Image (cartoon, grey):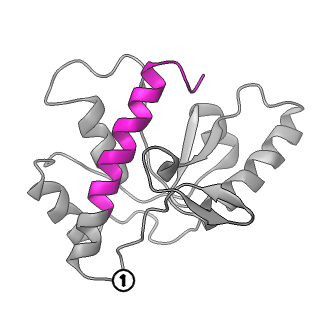
Amino acid sequence: MAEGVFQSLTQPSSSMPHPLISRIDSCGTGAYHIGSPPDSRTMATLAKNGITTYKHSARKFSPRTDFSEFDYILAMDDENLEDLERLREREVKRKGDGEGVGRVMLFGEFGGRRRKGNGKELGEEVEDPYYGGDGGFTVAYEQSVTFGKVFLERLERGELS
């Protein structure tokens, strides 16, 4: 869902794409549902909010490819953040330095509520709505809009360079 929302924020209607965003993609750290389209409740929530052109096919994160092709890798929750940070460390070691290796961040660091965890202050997790009712998809949509807007604002101000 976050990919569809972020696409709508960076490419409203058929106008010019955002000058700082060249590619947006979504994937999982696990091999679940590879090749499958988004959950029908995701698509219904996006459509209810005017996002009707979103298309996606599930894929698994590829460290060698994704860390070099993307500047920012945004995790939705702590578990995926830890997995991605571990994969990034391996990629940095493999390459010999961090040059050209995308940064890993929690999406909820951008406008989310702060919480305590592991002895430090953390950003908000995007709750996985898959096993819940439709209300969870609405919450995930709203989080994606908020976090996406704040991410873009910070990127435009040069705070993420």
Task: Indicate yes or no whether the magenta region holds residue 71.
Answer: no
Percent coordinates x, y for residue 161 in the rendering? 60, 22
The answer to whether 4 appears left or right of 87 in the picture is left
Picture quadrant of residue 92: top right
The residue beneath circle 1 is 131
Q: Nearer the viewer, residue 108 or 47?
A: 108
Instruction: Please name the residue shown 26% across and 50% down the image.
Output: 55
Percent coordinates x, y for residue 109 in the rendering? 52, 47
User: Can I make out residue 1 in this image?
Assistant: no
Q: Nearer the viewer, residue 113 or 73?
A: 113
The answer to whether 157 appears left or right of 44 in the picture is right
Picture quadrant of residue 71: top right
User: Can I make out residue 40 in this image?
Assistant: yes
Percent coordinates x, y for residue 133 in the rendering? 25, 82
Q: Crowding at label 1, few (<14), some or many (≥20) Cα neighbours within 10 Å?
A: few
The answer to whether 86 appears left or right of 81 in the picture is right
Q: Is residue 95 above or below residue 88?
A: above
Identity, as a three-letter code, of the amino acid under mark 1: Tyr
Q: Nearer the viewer, residue 104 or 33?
A: 104
Q: Which residues are the magenta region?
A: 140-161
Task: Indicate yes or no whether the magenta region holds residue 159.
Answer: yes
